[in-house]
């Protein structure tokens, strides 16, 4: 039987996927979380909660991986943006940050995993579990490539967002927060306001990134607007700007696009 890897993001979909595997009597061989270094503290705290659940049900632990520099030291997305005086790629309409900081670090681990190398040597493919739910089935575009067979368990089970939340509650687990970088340009105005109120130190770092960036085609982290303007309006208790059409982050909850 082919080896199975799971791309975990520690958000609602990933947690529900873990619960669903337990309920369906399934498992996996390797699980990975690609840490950009920019998640909110709540997500890092949730790692311990899900880790305990996996141990309780005899499932393998989730390995944390990250992007590395040429000298093999860790490179976070925030560091890269500050050093290059830019914003995350989604601010410019691209989604390469998920490719570089989510997909590539995980692929590197699997490429060097002996069990996967044996599968490929014998002409078989590794199964990769991704956490798109039934409400976003349009994102499950790929079934396979030269190395992987892509599987979308939540879609198979017909679990949309509400079914995922219900499964988490059924397992006796607290509901996780959103899995995304605190400085993600796809954040809504409400999420920007919430970051300011609940994590002022993180907001200060996001605004420092925005101020440091050399911008010509976009106004700031919001692409069409600067986060600094939203923060000022919020602090002055002025009406918030209306939300722009949402640009989904491709690395949302570990459901990275292959």
Image (cartoon, rainbow, N blue to C red):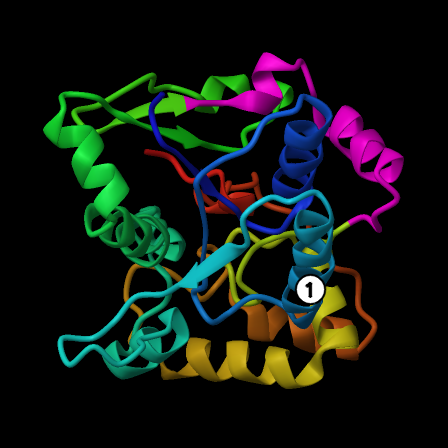
Q: How many tags in the picture? A: 1
Instruction: State yes or no: residue 152 in magenta.
Output: yes
Residue at position x 34%, y 81% in the image: 82
Q: Which corner quadrant of the image does residue 85 belong to?
A: bottom left
The quarter of the picture where the N terminus appears is: top left
- Asked if one can make out residue 222 in the rendered structure from this viewpoint, the answer is yes
Which portion, as a residue range, is magenta?
151-175
The quarter of the picture where the C terminus appears is: top left
List the residue tagged with mark 1: 48
Residue at position x 76%, y 72% in the image: 234
In screen coordinates, is 166 left or right of 117?
right
* Residue 165 % position (x, y): 80, 35
Residue at position x 83%, y 47% in the image: 173
* Residue 29 % position (x, y): 44, 40
- Asked if one can make out residue 241 in the rendered structure from this viewpoint, the answer is no
Residue at position x 31%, y 47% in the image: 94
In screen coordinates, is 41 left or right of 217?
right
Instruction: State yes or no: residue 104 in magenta.
Output: no
150 or 257: nearer the eye?
A: 150
Q: Which corner quadrant of the image does residue 246 belong to?
A: top right
Q: Residues within 10 Å of mark 1 (few under 14, many from 20)?
A: few
Q: Can you say whether 72 is above or below 95 in the image?
A: below
Q: Secondary structure at mark 1?
A: helix
In screen coordinates, is 218 left or right of 253?
left
176 or 244: nearer the eye?
A: 176
Q: Can you say whether 41 is above or below 143 in the image?
A: below
17 or 248: nearer the eye?
A: 17
Q: Which corner quadrant of the image does residue 210 belong to?
A: bottom left
* Residue 37 % position (x, y): 46, 71
């Amino acid at each position: 039987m082919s080896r199975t890897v799971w791309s975990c993001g520690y958000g609602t979909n990933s947690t529900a996927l873990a619960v669903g595997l337990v309920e369906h009597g399934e498992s996996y061989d390797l699980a990975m979380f690609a840490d950009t270094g920019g998640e909110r503290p709540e997500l890092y705290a949730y790692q311990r909660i899900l880790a305990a659940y996996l141990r309780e049900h005899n499932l393998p632990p989730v390995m944390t991986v990250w992007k590395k520099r040429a000298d093999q030291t860790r490179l976070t997305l925030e560091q890269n943006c500050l050093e290059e005086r830019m914003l995350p790629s989604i601010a410019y309409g691209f989604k390469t940050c998920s490719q570089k900081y989510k997909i590539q670090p995980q692929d590197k681990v699997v490429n060097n995993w002996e069990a996967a190398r044996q599968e490929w040597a014998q002409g078989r493919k590794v199964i990769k579990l991704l956490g798109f739910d039934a409400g976003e089935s349009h994102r499950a575009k790929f079934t396979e490539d030269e190395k992987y067979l892509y599987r979308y368990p939540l879609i198979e089970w017909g679990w949309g967002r509400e079914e995922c939340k219900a499964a988490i509650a059924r397992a006796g687990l607290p509901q996780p927060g959103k899995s995304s970088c605190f400085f993600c340009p796809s954040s809504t105005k409400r999420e920007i306001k919430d970051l300011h109120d609940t994590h002022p130190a993180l907001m200060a770092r996001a605004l420092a990134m925005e101020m440091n960036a050399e911008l010509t085609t976009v106004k700031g982290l919001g692409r069409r607007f600067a986060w600094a303007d939203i923060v000022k309006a919020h602090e002055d208790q002025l009406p918030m700007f209306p939300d722009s059409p949402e640009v989904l982050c491709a690395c949302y909850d570990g459901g990275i696009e292959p």
